[in-house]
Image: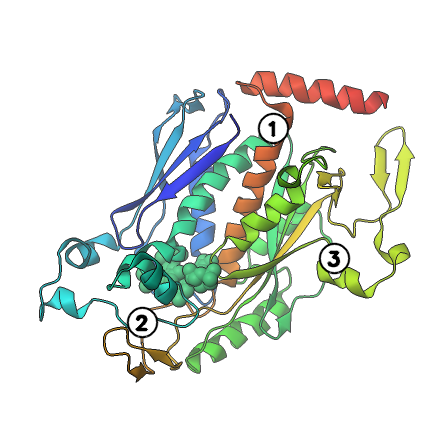
Protein backbone atom coordinates (compact mmCIF):
# COMPACT_ATOMS: atom_id res chain seq x y z
CA UNK A 1 0.00 0.00 0.00
CA UNK A 2 1.46 3.33 -0.97
CA UNK A 3 1.67 6.32 1.32
CA UNK A 4 -1.58 8.31 1.47
CA UNK A 5 -3.41 10.82 3.62
CA UNK A 6 -6.72 12.57 4.01
CA UNK A 7 -7.65 15.70 5.92
CA UNK A 8 -10.98 16.80 7.40
CA UNK A 9 -12.21 19.83 9.31
CA UNK A 10 -13.65 23.30 8.87
CA UNK A 11 -11.79 26.58 9.35
CA UNK A 12 -14.08 27.70 12.19
CA UNK A 13 -14.84 24.20 13.46
CA UNK A 14 -13.17 22.64 16.50
CA UNK A 15 -10.13 21.15 14.75
CA UNK A 16 -8.42 19.85 11.64
CA UNK A 17 -7.83 16.12 11.45
CA UNK A 18 -5.45 14.10 9.27
CA UNK A 19 -4.83 10.40 8.87
CA UNK A 20 -1.64 9.17 7.24
CA UNK A 21 -1.36 5.59 6.13
CA UNK A 22 1.68 3.73 4.85
CA UNK A 23 4.40 5.15 7.09
CA UNK A 24 7.04 2.60 8.09
CA UNK A 25 7.67 1.69 11.73
CA UNK A 26 10.55 3.03 13.80
CA UNK A 27 10.55 6.57 12.42
CA UNK A 28 11.40 8.81 15.35
CA UNK A 29 9.02 11.78 15.43
CA UNK A 30 10.53 15.07 16.52
CA UNK A 31 7.45 16.83 17.92
CA UNK A 32 9.25 20.13 18.40
CA UNK A 33 10.35 20.15 14.75
CA UNK A 34 6.80 19.27 13.65
CA UNK A 35 5.36 22.23 15.58
CA UNK A 36 8.15 24.48 14.32
CA UNK A 37 6.97 23.81 10.74
CA UNK A 38 3.39 24.73 11.74
CA UNK A 39 4.69 27.89 13.34
CA UNK A 40 6.57 28.82 10.12
CA UNK A 41 3.31 28.57 8.13
CA UNK A 42 1.65 31.09 10.43
CA UNK A 43 4.27 33.78 9.88
CA UNK A 44 4.87 36.18 7.02
CA UNK A 45 4.11 39.81 6.38
CA UNK A 46 0.59 40.42 5.07
CA UNK A 47 -1.36 37.90 7.15
CA UNK A 48 -4.65 38.94 8.76
CA UNK A 49 -5.78 38.92 12.40
CA UNK A 50 -6.67 35.23 12.44
CA UNK A 51 -3.02 34.29 12.73
CA UNK A 52 -2.81 36.17 16.04
CA UNK A 53 -5.61 33.98 17.40
CA UNK A 54 -4.12 30.64 16.36
CA UNK A 55 -1.03 28.97 17.91
CA UNK A 56 -0.89 25.87 15.76
CA UNK A 57 0.41 22.66 17.30
CA UNK A 58 -0.14 19.09 16.15
CA UNK A 59 -1.38 16.52 18.59
CA UNK A 60 -0.66 12.97 17.44
CA UNK A 61 -3.47 10.66 18.57
CA UNK A 62 -2.62 7.40 16.81
CA UNK A 63 0.22 5.38 15.29
CA UNK A 64 3.07 6.75 17.41
CA UNK A 65 4.26 5.20 20.67
CA UNK A 66 7.25 6.21 22.77
CA UNK A 67 8.07 8.81 20.11
CA UNK A 68 8.29 6.33 17.23
CA UNK A 69 5.88 5.23 14.50
CA UNK A 70 4.57 1.68 14.87
CA UNK A 71 3.52 1.12 11.24
CA UNK A 72 -0.14 1.80 12.13
CA UNK A 73 -1.98 4.78 10.58
CA UNK A 74 -0.84 8.05 12.13
CA UNK A 75 -3.72 10.29 13.20
CA UNK A 76 -3.14 13.91 14.13
CA UNK A 77 -5.20 16.93 15.04
CA UNK A 78 -4.58 20.68 14.94
CA UNK A 79 -7.05 22.59 17.13
CA UNK A 80 -8.69 25.86 15.99
CA UNK A 81 -8.52 28.45 18.77
CA UNK A 82 -11.02 30.58 16.81
CA UNK A 83 -13.68 27.88 17.28
CA UNK A 84 -14.72 29.40 20.59
CA UNK A 85 -15.82 32.56 18.73
CA UNK A 86 -17.79 30.61 16.14
CA UNK A 87 -19.44 27.84 18.16
CA UNK A 88 -22.99 29.18 17.83
CA UNK A 89 -22.64 30.13 14.14
CA UNK A 90 -21.26 26.68 13.38
CA UNK A 91 -23.70 24.68 15.54
CA UNK A 92 -27.08 26.41 15.52
CA UNK A 93 -29.47 26.03 12.59
CA UNK A 94 -30.30 29.67 11.75
CA UNK A 95 -33.82 30.89 12.57
CA UNK A 96 -35.03 33.82 10.46
CA UNK A 97 -34.03 37.14 12.00
CA UNK A 98 -31.59 35.52 14.52
CA UNK A 99 -27.93 36.53 14.85
CA UNK A 100 -26.94 33.22 13.26
CA UNK A 101 -29.21 33.93 10.28
CA UNK A 102 -27.47 37.29 9.85
CA UNK A 103 -24.18 35.40 9.60
CA UNK A 104 -25.47 33.26 6.73
CA UNK A 105 -23.26 33.91 3.69
CA UNK A 106 -25.25 34.70 0.54
CA UNK A 107 -22.82 37.02 -1.23
CA UNK A 108 -20.23 34.99 -3.14
CA UNK A 109 -16.70 36.41 -3.46
CA UNK A 110 -15.16 36.44 -6.95
CA UNK A 111 -12.03 34.27 -6.90
CA UNK A 112 -13.12 32.08 -3.97
CA UNK A 113 -14.94 28.72 -4.05
CA UNK A 114 -18.24 30.26 -2.78
CA UNK A 115 -20.43 30.35 -5.89
CA UNK A 116 -19.20 27.16 -7.59
CA UNK A 117 -19.49 25.24 -4.33
CA UNK A 118 -22.96 26.62 -3.55
CA UNK A 119 -24.28 25.71 -6.98
CA UNK A 120 -22.62 22.31 -7.12
CA UNK A 121 -23.62 21.12 -3.62
CA UNK A 122 -26.96 22.99 -3.64
CA UNK A 123 -26.09 24.90 -0.46
CA UNK A 124 -27.84 28.19 0.24
CA UNK A 125 -25.49 29.11 3.08
CA UNK A 126 -22.17 29.64 1.35
CA UNK A 127 -20.48 29.23 4.73
CA UNK A 128 -20.81 25.49 4.13
CA UNK A 129 -18.44 25.95 1.19
CA UNK A 130 -16.02 28.51 2.56
CA UNK A 131 -15.53 26.63 5.81
CA UNK A 132 -13.84 23.82 3.93
CA UNK A 133 -12.34 25.69 0.97
CA UNK A 134 -10.41 27.96 3.36
CA UNK A 135 -6.65 27.59 3.33
CA UNK A 136 -6.89 26.80 7.04
CA UNK A 137 -6.76 23.22 5.73
CA UNK A 138 -3.13 23.79 4.72
CA UNK A 139 -2.19 23.64 8.43
CA UNK A 140 -3.13 19.95 8.32
CA UNK A 141 -1.17 19.48 5.09
CA UNK A 142 1.90 21.09 6.65
CA UNK A 143 1.63 18.79 9.69
CA UNK A 144 1.43 15.77 7.38
CA UNK A 145 4.27 17.08 5.17
CA UNK A 146 6.40 17.77 8.25
CA UNK A 147 6.30 14.04 9.02
CA UNK A 148 7.25 13.26 5.40
CA UNK A 149 10.07 15.76 5.79
CA UNK A 150 11.34 13.91 8.86
CA UNK A 151 11.28 10.66 6.93
CA UNK A 152 13.33 12.26 4.15
CA UNK A 153 15.77 13.78 6.67
CA UNK A 154 16.38 10.28 8.03
CA UNK A 155 17.98 9.53 4.64
CA UNK A 156 19.86 12.82 4.27
CA UNK A 157 17.27 14.55 2.06
CA UNK A 158 16.73 18.25 2.88
CA UNK A 159 13.96 20.65 1.92
CA UNK A 160 14.02 24.47 1.70
CA UNK A 161 11.92 27.22 0.16
CA UNK A 162 11.98 30.89 -0.66
CA UNK A 163 9.81 33.65 -2.06
CA UNK A 164 10.84 34.66 -5.57
CA UNK A 165 8.32 37.37 -6.34
CA UNK A 166 5.56 39.39 -4.67
CA UNK A 167 3.63 41.35 -7.28
CA UNK A 168 6.05 43.69 -9.04
CA UNK A 169 8.96 42.98 -6.70
CA UNK A 170 11.30 40.17 -7.71
CA UNK A 171 14.06 38.76 -5.51
CA UNK A 172 17.54 38.53 -7.11
CA UNK A 173 18.38 34.98 -8.25
CA UNK A 174 20.50 32.82 -5.94
CA UNK A 175 21.67 29.22 -5.86
CA UNK A 176 22.57 28.88 -2.21
CA UNK A 177 23.22 25.53 -0.54
CA UNK A 178 20.05 24.31 1.18
CA UNK A 179 21.29 24.86 4.77
CA UNK A 180 22.25 28.45 3.98
CA UNK A 181 18.90 29.07 2.27
CA UNK A 182 17.01 27.73 5.29
CA UNK A 183 19.02 29.96 7.66
CA UNK A 184 18.62 33.16 5.67
CA UNK A 185 14.94 32.82 4.73
CA UNK A 186 14.06 31.99 8.32
CA UNK A 187 15.24 35.42 9.41
CA UNK A 188 13.03 37.17 6.83
CA UNK A 189 9.41 38.27 7.27
CA UNK A 190 8.78 37.53 3.58
CA UNK A 191 11.10 34.50 3.25
CA UNK A 192 13.70 36.09 1.00
CA UNK A 193 17.47 36.01 1.33
CA UNK A 194 18.46 39.69 1.24
CA UNK A 195 17.35 42.57 3.44
CA UNK A 196 16.85 45.09 0.64
CA UNK A 197 14.30 42.88 -1.15
CA UNK A 198 12.61 42.14 2.18
CA UNK A 199 12.12 45.88 2.80
CA UNK A 200 10.79 46.48 -0.72
CA UNK A 201 8.35 43.58 -0.42
CA UNK A 202 7.02 44.54 3.01
CA UNK A 203 6.51 48.18 1.92
CA UNK A 204 4.74 46.96 -1.20
CA UNK A 205 2.42 44.64 0.77
CA UNK A 206 1.58 47.51 3.17
CA UNK A 207 0.74 49.75 0.24
CA UNK A 208 -1.48 47.11 -1.39
CA UNK A 209 -3.27 46.53 1.93
CA UNK A 210 -3.80 50.27 2.47
CA UNK A 211 -5.44 50.40 -0.96
CA UNK A 212 -7.88 47.65 0.10
CA UNK A 213 -6.34 45.22 -2.35
CA UNK A 214 -4.41 41.93 -2.26
CA UNK A 215 -1.34 40.54 -4.00
CA UNK A 216 0.12 37.18 -5.07
CA UNK A 217 3.54 36.00 -6.13
CA UNK A 218 5.93 33.16 -6.93
CA UNK A 219 7.51 30.71 -4.49
CA UNK A 220 10.25 28.14 -4.97
CA UNK A 221 11.04 24.87 -3.24
CA UNK A 222 14.35 23.00 -3.50
CA UNK A 223 15.07 19.46 -2.34
CA UNK A 224 18.65 18.26 -2.00
CA UNK A 225 20.08 14.77 -1.63
CA UNK A 226 17.43 12.92 -3.64
CA UNK A 227 18.71 9.67 -5.18
CA UNK A 228 18.53 9.12 -8.95
CA UNK A 229 15.44 7.24 -10.11
CA UNK A 230 12.46 8.33 -7.98
CA UNK A 231 9.32 8.32 -10.15
CA UNK A 232 9.13 6.49 -13.48
CA UNK A 233 8.82 7.11 -17.20
CA UNK A 234 6.75 3.96 -17.76
CA UNK A 235 3.28 5.23 -16.82
CA UNK A 236 1.78 8.75 -16.79
CA UNK A 237 0.75 8.68 -13.18
CA UNK A 238 4.15 7.49 -11.99
CA UNK A 239 5.98 10.55 -13.36
CA UNK A 240 7.12 12.35 -10.22
CA UNK A 241 7.37 15.79 -11.83
CA UNK A 242 3.70 15.45 -12.86
CA UNK A 243 2.68 14.39 -9.36
CA UNK A 244 4.54 17.33 -7.85
CA UNK A 245 2.77 19.71 -10.27
CA UNK A 246 -0.60 18.33 -9.16
CA UNK A 247 0.30 18.79 -5.51
CA UNK A 248 1.50 22.37 -6.07
CA UNK A 249 -1.56 23.48 -8.06
CA UNK A 250 -3.78 21.89 -5.39
CA UNK A 251 -2.61 24.51 -2.85
CA UNK A 252 -5.32 27.15 -2.38
CA UNK A 253 -4.87 30.05 -4.82
CA UNK A 254 -2.05 28.39 -6.82
CA UNK A 255 -2.47 28.72 -10.57
CA UNK A 256 0.68 27.14 -11.99
CA UNK A 257 3.83 25.13 -11.44
CA UNK A 258 7.25 25.15 -13.06
CA UNK A 259 9.99 22.55 -12.80
CA UNK A 260 13.50 24.00 -13.12
CA UNK A 261 13.57 26.89 -15.60
CA UNK A 262 9.98 25.99 -16.53
CA UNK A 263 8.34 28.49 -18.92
CA UNK A 264 11.74 30.07 -19.69
CA UNK A 265 12.56 26.90 -21.67
CA UNK A 266 10.18 28.06 -24.40
CA UNK A 267 12.50 30.97 -25.27
CA UNK A 268 15.79 29.03 -25.33
CA UNK A 269 17.49 26.54 -27.68
CA UNK A 270 18.09 22.91 -26.80
CA UNK A 271 21.80 23.60 -26.35
CA UNK A 272 20.93 26.25 -23.75
CA UNK A 273 18.51 24.06 -21.81
CA UNK A 274 19.70 20.45 -21.51
CA UNK A 275 22.05 19.58 -18.67
CA UNK A 276 25.22 17.91 -19.92
CA UNK A 277 26.14 14.54 -18.43
CA UNK A 278 29.43 14.18 -16.51
CA UNK A 279 31.08 11.32 -14.65
CA UNK A 280 33.75 11.05 -12.00
CA UNK A 281 34.56 8.22 -9.62
CA UNK A 282 33.57 10.14 -6.48
CA UNK A 283 30.21 11.61 -7.60
CA UNK A 284 29.29 9.08 -10.27
CA UNK A 285 26.98 10.45 -12.97
CA UNK A 286 26.06 14.07 -12.49
CA UNK A 287 25.20 17.20 -14.49
CA UNK A 288 27.18 20.27 -15.48
CA UNK A 289 24.08 22.46 -14.86
CA UNK A 290 20.58 21.99 -13.42
CA UNK A 291 18.17 23.81 -15.69
CA UNK A 292 15.66 20.99 -15.78
CA UNK A 293 15.15 21.11 -12.02
CA UNK A 294 16.29 17.57 -11.27
CA UNK A 295 13.95 15.69 -13.64
CA UNK A 296 14.13 13.84 -16.96
CA UNK A 297 11.54 11.26 -18.00
CA UNK A 298 9.50 11.82 -14.85
CA UNK A 299 12.45 10.49 -12.82
CA UNK A 300 14.86 12.30 -10.53
CA UNK A 301 18.36 12.63 -11.98
CA UNK A 302 20.18 13.23 -8.69
CA UNK A 303 20.42 17.01 -9.04
CA UNK A 304 18.45 19.33 -6.73
CA UNK A 305 14.69 19.24 -7.30
CA UNK A 306 13.68 22.84 -8.08
CA UNK A 307 9.94 23.63 -8.23
CA UNK A 308 8.14 26.93 -8.49
CA UNK A 309 4.51 27.76 -7.90
CA UNK A 310 2.50 30.87 -8.72
CA UNK A 311 -0.10 32.15 -6.27
CA UNK A 312 -2.85 34.50 -7.39
CA UNK A 313 -3.84 37.45 -5.15
CA UNK A 314 -6.12 36.66 -2.18
CA UNK A 315 -9.81 36.79 -3.31
CA UNK A 316 -11.35 38.47 -0.23
CA UNK A 317 -10.96 42.20 -0.81
CA UNK A 318 -11.81 45.38 1.04
CA UNK A 319 -11.93 47.01 -2.38
CA UNK A 320 -15.31 46.08 -3.87
CA UNK A 321 -15.58 43.74 -6.85
CA UNK A 322 -18.86 43.11 -8.57
CA UNK A 323 -20.86 40.04 -7.60
CA UNK A 324 -24.49 38.90 -7.31
CA UNK A 325 -26.49 38.12 -4.15
CA UNK A 326 -27.79 34.53 -4.40
CA UNK A 327 -31.03 35.44 -2.53
CA UNK A 328 -32.09 38.51 -4.50
CA UNK A 329 -29.98 38.02 -7.69
CA UNK A 330 -29.20 41.73 -7.29
CA UNK A 331 -25.69 43.02 -7.88
CA UNK A 332 -23.72 44.13 -4.83
CA UNK A 333 -20.19 45.39 -4.46
CA UNK A 334 -19.12 45.39 -0.82
CA UNK A 335 -18.13 42.32 1.15
CA UNK A 336 -15.74 43.30 3.90
CA UNK A 337 -14.39 40.24 5.70
CA UNK A 338 -11.32 39.68 7.84
CA UNK A 339 -8.67 38.45 5.44
CA UNK A 340 -4.99 38.14 4.57
CA UNK A 341 -3.75 40.71 2.06
CA UNK A 342 -0.73 38.61 1.07
CA UNK A 343 -0.09 34.99 2.06
CA UNK A 344 2.78 34.26 -0.33
CA UNK A 345 5.41 33.72 2.44
CA UNK A 346 3.05 31.32 4.26
CA UNK A 347 2.27 29.57 0.99
CA UNK A 348 5.98 28.97 0.39
CA UNK A 349 5.99 26.90 3.61
CA UNK A 350 2.91 25.01 2.43
CA UNK A 351 4.60 24.29 -0.89
CA UNK A 352 7.72 22.87 0.79
CA UNK A 353 5.49 20.40 2.61
CA UNK A 354 3.30 19.24 -0.27
CA UNK A 355 6.40 18.70 -2.43
CA UNK A 356 8.20 16.88 0.43
CA UNK A 357 5.16 14.63 0.71
CA UNK A 358 5.27 13.65 -2.99
CA UNK A 359 9.01 12.96 -2.82
CA UNK A 360 8.59 10.87 0.35
CA UNK A 361 5.81 8.91 -1.33
CA UNK A 362 7.97 8.17 -4.38
CA UNK A 363 10.88 7.34 -2.07
CA UNK A 364 8.80 4.70 -0.28
CA UNK A 365 7.53 3.33 -3.59
CA UNK A 366 11.15 2.75 -4.63
CA UNK A 367 12.68 1.59 -1.33
CA UNK A 368 9.48 0.54 0.43
CA UNK A 369 9.72 -1.58 3.51
CA UNK A 370 7.72 -1.89 6.68
CA UNK A 371 10.42 -0.46 8.94
CA UNK A 372 13.04 2.28 8.63
CA UNK A 373 15.73 -0.43 8.87
CA UNK A 374 14.29 -2.37 5.92
CA UNK A 375 14.10 0.82 3.84
CA UNK A 376 17.70 1.71 4.70
CA UNK A 377 18.88 -1.71 3.57
CA UNK A 378 16.96 -1.36 0.29
CA UNK A 379 18.39 2.11 -0.32
CA UNK A 380 21.96 1.01 0.39
CA UNK A 381 21.58 -1.96 -1.90
CA UNK A 382 20.35 0.33 -4.69
CA UNK A 383 23.14 2.87 -4.12
CA UNK A 384 25.67 0.03 -4.48
CA UNK A 385 23.96 -1.00 -7.72
CA UNK A 386 24.28 2.59 -9.02
CA UNK A 387 27.96 2.60 -8.02
CA UNK A 388 28.60 -0.50 -10.13
CA UNK A 389 26.75 0.85 -13.19
C1 LIG B 1 -1.78 30.36 3.24
C2 LIG B 1 -2.99 30.86 2.50
C3 LIG B 1 -3.80 31.83 3.09
C4 LIG B 1 -4.93 32.30 2.42
N1 LIG B 1 -5.68 33.27 3.02
C5 LIG B 1 -6.79 33.74 2.40
C6 LIG B 1 -7.61 34.76 3.00
O1 LIG B 1 -7.31 35.25 4.10
N2 LIG B 1 -8.69 35.16 2.33
C7 LIG B 1 -9.05 34.65 1.11
O2 LIG B 1 -10.04 35.06 0.53
N3 LIG B 1 -8.31 33.69 0.52
C8 LIG B 1 -7.19 33.21 1.13
N4 LIG B 1 -6.43 32.24 0.52
C9 LIG B 1 -6.82 31.76 -0.81
C10 LIG B 1 -8.11 30.94 -0.84
O3 LIG B 1 -8.06 29.89 0.11
C11 LIG B 1 -8.33 30.35 -2.25
O4 LIG B 1 -8.25 31.35 -3.20
C12 LIG B 1 -9.71 29.66 -2.30
O5 LIG B 1 -9.66 28.46 -1.54
C13 LIG B 1 -10.17 29.32 -3.73
O6 LIG B 1 -9.38 28.35 -4.32
P1 LIG B 1 -8.48 28.64 -5.61
O7 LIG B 1 -7.97 30.04 -5.46
O8 LIG B 1 -7.38 27.63 -5.55
O9 LIG B 1 -9.33 28.51 -6.83
C14 LIG B 1 -5.27 31.79 1.15
C15 LIG B 1 -4.46 30.80 0.56
C16 LIG B 1 -3.31 30.35 1.22
C17 LIG B 1 -2.44 29.30 0.57
C1 LIG C 1 -7.02 30.30 8.94
C2 LIG C 1 -6.06 30.43 8.04
O1 LIG C 1 -6.15 31.20 6.92
C3 LIG C 1 -7.42 31.66 6.51
C4 LIG C 1 -7.56 31.31 5.06
C5 LIG C 1 -8.74 31.95 4.46
C6 LIG C 1 -9.18 31.46 3.14
O2 LIG C 1 -10.25 31.89 2.70
O3 LIG C 1 -8.47 30.67 2.52
C7 LIG C 1 -9.38 33.00 5.08
C8 LIG C 1 -8.99 33.54 6.40
O4 LIG C 1 -9.80 32.95 7.40
P1 LIG C 1 -10.59 33.81 8.47
O5 LIG C 1 -11.73 34.39 7.75
O6 LIG C 1 -10.99 32.84 9.55
O7 LIG C 1 -9.61 34.83 8.98
C9 LIG C 1 -7.55 33.16 6.73
O8 LIG C 1 -7.25 33.51 8.04
C10 LIG C 1 -4.78 29.73 8.17
O9 LIG C 1 -3.95 29.88 7.25
O10 LIG C 1 -4.58 29.00 9.18
Mark 2 lies on a secondary structure that is loop
Crowd class of label 2 (few under 14; some 14 to 19; many from 20; radius 10 Å): few
Closer to the chain start, of discs 2 and 3, is: 3
Q: Which residue is mark 3?
A: 261
User: Closer to the observer: label 1 or label 3?
Assistant: 1
CA separation in Å, label 2 and label 3: 38 Å
Q: Which residue is mark 2?
A: 337
Residue nearest the observer in this picture, 111 or 279: 111
In the visual, does 316 lie left or right of 385? left
In the visual, does 122 lie left or right of 186? left
Residue 141 x/y as whole percent:
45, 45
Crowd class of label 1 (few under 14; some 14 to 19; many from 20; radius 10 Å): some
Which residue is depicted at the point 14% across and 64% down? 100
Closer to the chain start, of discs 1 and 3, is: 3
Mark 1 lies on a secondary structure that is helix
Is label 1 within 8 A of ligand 1 (CB to nearest ligand atom)? no
Q: Which residue is mark 1?
A: 365
Q: Is residue 147 above or below residue 216?
A: above
Closer to the chain start, of discs 2 and 1, is: 2
Residue nearest the observer in this picture, 156 or 1: 1
Which residue is depicted at the point 15% across and 67% down? 101
User: Closer to the observer: label 2 or label 1?
Assistant: 1
CA separation in Å, label 1 and label 3: 27 Å
Residue 93 x/y as whole percent:
13, 57
Is label 2 within 8 A of ligand 2 (CB to nearest ligand atom)? yes
Which residue is depicted at the point 23% across and 53% down? 83
Q: Is residue 119 above or below residue 182?
A: below
Does residue 157 appear anywhere in the picture? yes
Q: Is residue 240 above or below residue 328?
A: above
Q: Quadrant of residue 165?
A: bottom right
Does residue 48 appear anywhere in the picture? no
Q: Is residue 373 above or below residue 331?
A: above
Amino acid sequence: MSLRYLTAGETHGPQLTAIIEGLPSNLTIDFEELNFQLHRRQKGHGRGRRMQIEKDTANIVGGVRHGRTTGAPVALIVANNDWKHWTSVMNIEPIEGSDEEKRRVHRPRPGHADLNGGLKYDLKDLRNVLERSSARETAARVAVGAIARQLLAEFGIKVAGQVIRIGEIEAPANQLPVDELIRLTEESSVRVVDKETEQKMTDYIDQIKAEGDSIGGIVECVIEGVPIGLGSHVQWDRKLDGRIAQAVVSINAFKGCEIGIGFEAAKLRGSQVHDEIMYDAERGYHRATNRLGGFEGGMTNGEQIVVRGVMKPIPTLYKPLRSVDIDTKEPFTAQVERSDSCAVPAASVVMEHVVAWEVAKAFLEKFGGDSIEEIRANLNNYLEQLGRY
